[in-house]
Image (tube, rainbow, N blue to C red):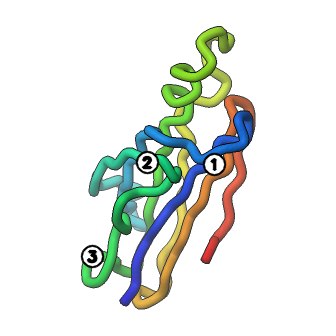
């Protein structure tokens, strides 16, 4: 059964990013139009309590995860310069095999981020 999961790591504090808001969108490849699917908040392990999509919910197509890193770091580091250097981090990716596990981790700070296809 295919599924989509994520994990967020706070590289400033060297820990999982707990309480970070993530939005999931599907993207129409022809028009670029986005369709909102859901909003979730990371748990104490920096993960969601369940897969973002699983089984029949996971379809071949283009998606976007929108990570609210600005709000997350503003709560932890109140003296960050304004405006924020990073506020929303969008990661657009494709699902080519709806039976596979797609894991999209985010490693982030207020000034940088990195991602990869995890396992």
Image quadrant occupied by the C terminus: bottom right
Q: Earlier in the sequence, mark 3 or mark 1?
A: 1
Q: Position of residue 99 (x, y in %)?
A: 41, 90
Residue visible at 48% across and 87% down in the picture: 100
Provide the residue designation for mark 1.
Answer: 9
Provide the residue designation for mark 2.
Answer: 42
Side of 86 relative to 6 (left or right): right
Provide the residue designation for mark 3.
Answer: 57
Q: Secondary structure at mark 3?
A: helix
Residue visible at 37% across and 68% down in the picture: 51
Q: Is residue 115 above or below residue 66?
A: below
Q: Quadrant of residue 58?
A: bottom left
Residue occupying the far front of the picture:
44
Tell me, yes or no, whether the two marked residues, 2 and 3, touch with CB atoms within 8 Å. Answer: no
Q: Secondary structure at mark 1?
A: strand
User: Circle 2: is it few (<14), some (14-19), or many (20+) Cα within 10 Å?
Assistant: some
Tell me, yes or no, whether the two marked residues, 3 and 1, touch with CB atoms within 8 Å. Answer: no
Q: Nearer the viewer, mark 3 or mark 1?
A: 1
Q: Nearer the viewer, mark 2 or mark 3?
A: 2
Q: Position of residue 107 (x, y in %)?
A: 67, 49
Side of 14 relative to 18 (left or right): right
Q: Is residue 79 above or below residue 57?
A: above
Residue visible at 54% across and 47% down in the picture: 90
Mark 2 and mark 3: Cα distance apart in space? 20 Å
Q: Earlier in the sequence, mark 2 or mark 3?
A: 2
């Amino acid at each position: 059964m295919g599924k989509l999961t994520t994990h967020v790591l706070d590289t400033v504090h060297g820990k999982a990013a707990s309480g970070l808001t993530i939005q999931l969108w599907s993207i129409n490849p022809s028009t670029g139009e986005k369709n909102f699917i859901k909003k979730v908040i990371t748990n104490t392990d920096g993960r969601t309590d369940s897969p973002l999509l699983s089984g029949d919910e996971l379809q071949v197509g283009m998606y976007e995860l929108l990570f609210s890193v600005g709000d997350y770091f503003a709560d932890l580091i109140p003296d960050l310069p304004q405006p924020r250097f990073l506020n929303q981090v969008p990661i657009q990716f494709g699902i080519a095999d709806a039976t596979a596990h797609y894991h999209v981790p985010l490693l982030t700070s207020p000034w940088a981020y990195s991602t990869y296809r995890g396992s």
